[in-house]
């Protein structure tokens, strides 16, 4: 049996005319960005390579973690200010009871590892990749930045206590450098 191109097109056209109460590209549920008090989604991020999965919910269970996200590794604001601030303040944050400091970006794990090496993050900040943006999408904290390749994370920081958001700081324009900086983190004791 041979299927012609026009038969396929007619089949697609017929499918598109069928009544449906849902769109193929959108859900019927409106998402809201994660808020203080919400639990983190149980999703895998990657550290150093695609073989090294880190479940963010498991990582933050039973401890206090500072997580910050950046639009892109090696970008000017992220490399000159955001990441270096957390590296410099790591000892202070850890003395205030923070068990882990985590940097997340919609990049591949090799890029995040190289960026971490360049900024001497070992033992201070864990560099976790969200290659498909699934974690950032689940938080509803993504943005479209075509010059950086499209979908990226807004710039934000959060304090997580036992897998729940305790503090959330999202930059008003999604990319600025004000409320999400390391020196703005308030650790509740």
Image (spheres, rainbow, N blue to C red):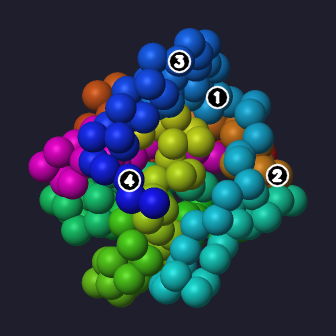
Q: Is residue 145 magenta?
A: yes
Badge 1 marks a residue whose secondary structure is loop
In this rendering, the answer to whether 122 lies above or below 174 is below
Element at label 3? loop
- Mark linked to residue 18: 3
Depth check: give the residue in front, 36 or 141: 141
Q: What's the distance in space between the residues labelled 2 and 3, CA to CA?
A: 47 Å
Rendering coords of residue 92 (x, y %): 56, 63
Find the magenta span and give its range: 144-159
Of labels 4 and 3, earlier in sequence is: 4
Measured Cα–Cα span from mark 3 to mark 1: 38 Å
Label 4 to label 3, Cα distance in Å?
22 Å
**Tag 1 or tag 2, which sits nearer the N-term?**
1
Q: Quadrant of the N terminus?
A: bottom left
Image: 118 above or below 185: below
Disc 4 or 1, which lies upstream in sequence?
4
Tag in front: 4 or 1: 4
Residue of label 1: 35
């Amino acid at each position: 049996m041979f299927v012609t191109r026009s038969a396929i097109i007619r089949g697609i056209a017929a499918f598109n005319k069928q009544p449906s109460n849902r769109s193929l590209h959108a859900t019927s549920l409106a998402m809201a960005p994660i808020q203080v008090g919400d639990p983190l989604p149980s999703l895998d991020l990657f550290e150093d390579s695609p073989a090294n999965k880190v479940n963010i919910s498991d990582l933050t269970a039973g401890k206090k973690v500072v997580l910050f996200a950046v639009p892109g590794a090696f970008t000017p604001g992220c490399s000159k200010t955001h990441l270096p601030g957390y590296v410099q303040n790591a000892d202070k944050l850890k003395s205030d009871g923070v068990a882990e400091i985590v940097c997340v970006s919609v990049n591949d794990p090799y890029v995040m590892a190289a960026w971490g090496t360049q900024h001497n993050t070992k033992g201070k900040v864990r560099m976790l990749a969200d290659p498909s943006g699934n974690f950032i999408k689940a938080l509803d904290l993504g943005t479209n930045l075509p010059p950086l390749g499209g979908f990226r994370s807004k710039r934000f920081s959060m304090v997580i206590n036992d897998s729940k958001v305790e503090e959330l700081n999202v930059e008003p324009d999604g990319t600025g450098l004000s409320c999400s900086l390391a020196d703005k983190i308030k650790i509740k004791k």
